[in-house]
Image: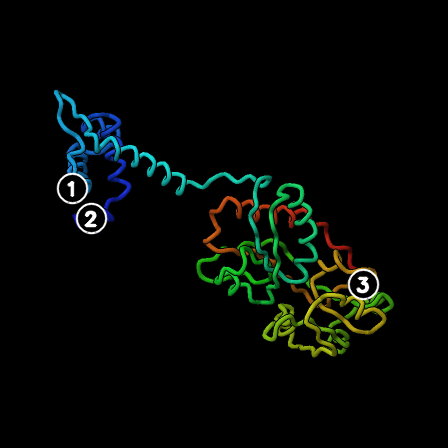
Amino acid sequence: MPREQHLKTDFHALRVLAAVYEHGSISDAADYLDMSQSTVSYTIERLRGVFGDPLFVKQGRRIRPTRRCDDVAGGVRELLQLYERMVVPTEFDPALSTDTFVLSCNYYERGILLAPLVQRLRQFAPNVRLTTISADGDGSRQLEQDLCDVVISPISDYGSGSYSEQLLAERYACFVSHDSPWCRTRMDLGSYVAARHIHVRPSINWRPKFHTALDRLGVSISPQVEVCSFGDIDKVIEGTDLVLTATEGFTRIYSTRIVCIRAPFDCSFSIHMGWTGRTHRSPAHIWFRSLLREIASDLPKPRPLAL
């Protein structure tokens, strides 16, 4: 018999064979499977050609399996059990897991999420490995190329075949040195435009979302200083007249070297968590994403603004 005929045998046909073998009757197997007797008989006849054996022979008023069928039925039972284990997600025990999770995010997300994430992994999943990479506006490609399992960034759409949900709600504010006059006097829009600004541009094409708010107001700003990361930017601003526009959530990270004041415009945005269908139903990754949600919801509120 051509090999292709073997490969055309599906799990449905094998399930029919197992039911007939178990019940010792075409009619009883048909009732059990909620199928017609003719369909069951046709399937068994087809399998006779596949295995080159009668499989079942009539003996009195019942049918009996052949010796070859005894051997086949044992293998079919194992195959069906293996298939069930494949299609039904297994349970995940974080305490026993040795999985590796790759998290892509930016400086801000690392600053507020990484420490509590590591602490909880040590507590609940001590043998799990964690790797972080920088998103830098490239999260969609990283997910598409399986370079990471989860991306957390201000981007909400991570491309076809991906999933996304809001993790945090953020609002823009300004950060100035603790001896800045703007710590004592409310900054208006004209003063903001005229100020000396410091920008963070993690990638060449990155444009902060607050620029859209400024466009609507018909104003624009040009940075005096531009850096590639928020790291140590509080040290750079301290003792200067530079103004940083960033999420007020940075009050959770920055020292008292700089002070958070209200921005002279209203602009909010969201931090999103993204992942792909490859890990969407994985129990291990479902657990990892739920851990990130819990950490985000437990974050302390940003410190009050100076003005």
In terms of sequence position, does the residue under pointer 1 or pointer 3 come before the other? 1
Instruction: Find residue 49 and name its label.
Output: 1
Picture coordinates of residue 135, whole percent (x, y): 59, 64
For label 3, count other residues whose C-alpha is less than 10 Å away and answer few (under 14), some (14-19) or many (20+). many
Residue 163, relative to residue 51: is it above or below?
A: below
- Point out the residue furthest to the top here: 60
Q: Which residue is mark 2?
A: 5
Query: Which amino acid is tagged 1?
Result: Gly
Q: Nearer the viewer, mark 1 or mark 3?
A: 1
Picture coordinates of residue 291, whole percent (x, y): 60, 46
- Image position of 133 (left or right of 188): left
Residue at 74% in and 77% down: 225
In depth, the one of 132 and 224 nearer the eye is: 132
Query: Which amino acid is tagged 3?
Result: Val
Residue at 56% in and 44% down: 287
Picture coordinates of residue 185, whole percent (x, y): 83, 67
In depth, the one of 253 and 246 nearer the eye is: 253
What whole-number distance in Å separates the C-alpha atoms at marks 1 and 3?
81 Å
Residue 70, relative to residue 170: is it above or below?
A: above
Q: Which residue is mark 3?
A: 259
Q: Dots 1 and 2: beta carbons under 8 Å?
A: yes
- Image position of 237 (left or right of 59): right
Picture coordinates of residue 241, whole percent (x, y): 82, 74
As helix, strand or loop, the secondary structure at mark 1 comes to helix
In terms of sequence position, does the residue under pointer 1 or pointer 2 come before the other? 2
- Image position of 156 (left or right of 198): left
